[in-house]
Image (spheres, helix red, strand yellow):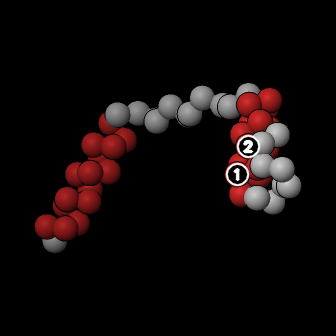
Amino acid sequence: MLLLALLLYLLARRSARGPVPAPTPVPPRQRALDSLDALGRSGLVEGGEL
């Protein structure tokens, strides 16, 4: 019973704060560069540094 009360309290507190703002989107160019960098580090692309 105490656990249920605690759960309800936490839910009420969380909803009182309002919606959580969405994270800032990463520009497509930066996302592409990050994925190329990750491929280079993983060794899937020969030559390492691009």
Query: Which quarter of the figure has residue 36?
Result: top right
Query: Which quarter of the figure has residue 7?
Result: bottom left
Q: Residue at x 34, y 34 (%)?
A: 17
Q: Which mark is residue 37?
A: 2
* Residue 35 in view here: no
Q: Is residue 15 left or right of residue 10?
A: right
* Residue 30 in view here: yes
Above/below status of 5 relative to 21? below
Q: Type of residue at label 2?
A: Asp
Q: Type of residue at label 1?
A: Arg
Q: Residue at x 60, y 29 (%)?
A: 24
Which element type, helix, strand or loop, lies under badge 2?
helix
- How far, Cα to Cα, is label 1 from label 2? 6 Å
Q: Residue at x 13, y 67 (%)?
A: 2
Residue 11 horizontal/vertical position (percent): 32, 51
Residue 40 horizontal/vertical position (percent): 76, 49
Question: Residue under circle 1?
Answer: 41
